Amino acid sequence: MSGGHFDYAQYKLEAIADEIRNLIVQNENTASYPGAKYSAETIAKFLEADKTLRLAAVMAQRIDWLVSGDDGEESFHARWDEDIKRLTTAST
C-alpha cells in the first residue's frame, strides 16, 4: 500500500525529465550557462523526450497505485484518463 511496487522508480523518470528541461533552459540562455548551443531540431527532440518521460512516470504511478491496492480499477481508469489528458494538453 501507499505505492512502492516499482520501488518509486517513476520519480527517477520525473527527475530525468526535469534535467532535460534544465538543459533546454541552459540552451536558451547560453550567456548564463556557457556551453553547447543545440539546434532547434535537437531541442525539439529534448522536448519530445521530456513529454514522453513525464507520461511514462504518470503511467507507472497509476499502475503502481493499482497493484499496491491504493486504487481500485475504477479509480485507476479515471485517474489515468485525467492525468494523461492533463499532460497531453499542457504546453511545454
Image: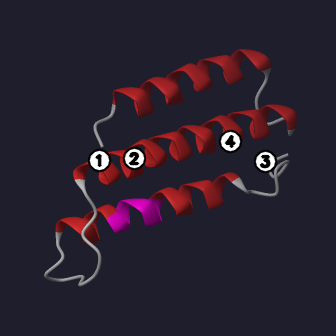
Split into 4 quadrants, where in the image is the N terminus?
A: top right
Label 1 belongs to which residue? Answer: 41
Q: Is residue 42 left or right of residue 63?
A: left
Magenta span has 19?
yes
**Closer to the eye: label 3 or 2:** 2
User: Which of labels 2 and 4 is toward the front?
Assistant: 2
Q: Earlier in the sequence, mark 3 or mark 2?
A: 3
Look at 75% across and 34% down and name the residue there.
63
**Residue stretch in magenta:** 18-23
The answer to whether residue 80 is above or below residue 64 is above
Depth check: give the residue in front, 90 or 45: 45
**Mark 3 / mark 1, whichever is N-terminal:** 3
Q: Is residue 5 left or right of residue 21?
A: right
Q: Determine whether label 4 and label 3 are within 8 Å by CB.
A: yes
* Amino acid at pointer 2: Lys
Local packing at callout 3 (Cα closer than 10 Å; few below 14, some 14-19, many 20+) is some
